[in-house]
Image: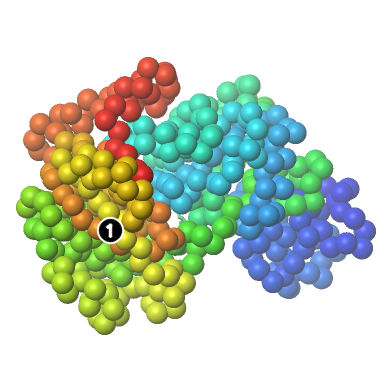
Amino acid sequence: MEAVSEAEATPGEPLCSGCGAPLQSDDPTRPGYVPPEAVQRETLVCRRCYRIRHYGEFSPVSVPPEQYADQVSRIQGEAGQVLYVLDVFDLSGSLVPGLAGLIGGANVDLVVNKVDLLPPEVKAERLADWVWSTVESTGVRPRRVWFVSARTGQGLDEVVAALSQPDVGQVWVVGMANVGKSTLLNRLAARLKGSEPFTVSRVPGTTLGLVRATLPVADGRSLAVVDTPGLLTGRRAIDVLCADCLRAVVPSGRLKPRVYQLDPGQSLWLGGFARFDFAEGDHQPVVVYVSNDLVVHRTKLERAAYIGEVRQDEVLKVPCARCRAELGEHIPHRLALGRPARAVERAVQRVQQGPPLLSADSPRGVDVVLAGLGWIAFYGRDLLGTLWAPAGVALDIRPRLIGDASAGDHAGQQTSARQRAFATRRGRSAQASGRQGRPRRK
Ligand code: GDP
């Protein structure tokens, strides 16, 4: 087994001789962590480098924004492509703020992870258009998008095939904390690994904890994987929740759709995290896709506030009082779907004030996505309402993912085929057609 280079460790200064991060025994989730019992050893590497080198195993570390920018912007001085890992269940929450500026002109491929959480009827490829445009709106111009589950291995064949190409020498893996970057790297490493052990070295010119793990891939070649720390902004809902609340919110298995036939004057609480008030519109089905462990509570509109204020712990269970305080107050967003959407938008254009508006007049229906929590599917019927959520839960709207037994499903299948082509070829004309009738977010 090749030794970790010690050449760059400054004498007297406790730095990891693998990645160069300052060594510390306080926080296992930060770069440079060494368990206290290992501090006495002569040649010190941090636990992360140790595990990669000895077991071929990547472990998650994260850093706050100031350090993150310093680390990831190193890619501009180096060759290599970027694997940008996103969480399908929290797409907006997994966008790295300012990434386009940090990586310059590097080639970017998107790896959309955790598709095992989607209900079986969802073809992940149908998300391609939504993912693509969401990422592009941040200034990042991806080349390809892959939908995978690092947990089950689903969809990884194409990623492995792409990384095995002879012209790929170095890959930077970037992503927010908790998107599954380490789980993915471990899967990929196991699939790519040749017969030799891994080596670990610092990325030249850094003392910050970027690890370059050289994987001897099959046929005598090697692939340098640069593992970057995950970004922890503290602004996502999941960043501020305690372990118990997190367990209820982050799905541990495939989502089971929960169907409600709603009339105006009814409300739905999603745990105590968010509430949908149905003010006006047709009687209609609404399907909620959230963690199977999260309570969804239907009530009358006039009782909804009372449930949230007085019976929260008893009925809605989470978030706990501490997490409620962290998340802050619920903010109202107007929701206008179907025919009222245009009228409401015109009115909003005239008077640019009041709560933010989520609107769409797509007859196929839309999903209103609550970042990190899940989504509510609406079926294209007329509706006016209000969605209440804390500021840390970003809201988004996209074409409805899941079809039904009617003609709408047929339309969905056509979309699926188009978007699959779109996902791999990325033609501008396909993109344009994919955007017709796109719901709007104001
Ligand atoms: P990192 O911080 O981005 O390195 O994330 P980790 O690899 O540590 O994963 C964060 C959490 O997401 C862990 O609880 C993982 O078990 C979970 N996770 C990772 N990949 C998947 C996946 O493909 N599907 C599901 N359901 N969970 C995943």
Residue at left offset 63%, top offset 21%: 167
Return the x and y of residue 113 as percentages of the image width and height: 43, 44
Return the x and y of residue 433 as percentages of the image width and height: 31, 22
Residue matched to label 1? 387
Q: Nearer the viewer, residue 354 or 116?
A: 354
Residue at left offset 82%, top offset 70%: 40
**39 relative position to 411: left or right:** right
**329 relative position to 60: left or right:** left
Return the x and y of residue 398 as percentages of the image width and height: 31, 41
Task: Answer with the quarter of the image where residue 306 lies.
Answer: bottom left
Q: Nearer the viewer, residue 16 or 316?
A: 316
| Residue 70 in the image: above or below residue 265 | above
Residue at left offset 26%, top offset 63%: 275
Task: Answer with the quarter of the image where residue 157 lies.
Answer: top left
In this view, the residue farthest toward the right is 11
Specify the amino acid type for callout 1: Leu
Q: Nearer the viewer, residue 292 or 241?
A: 241
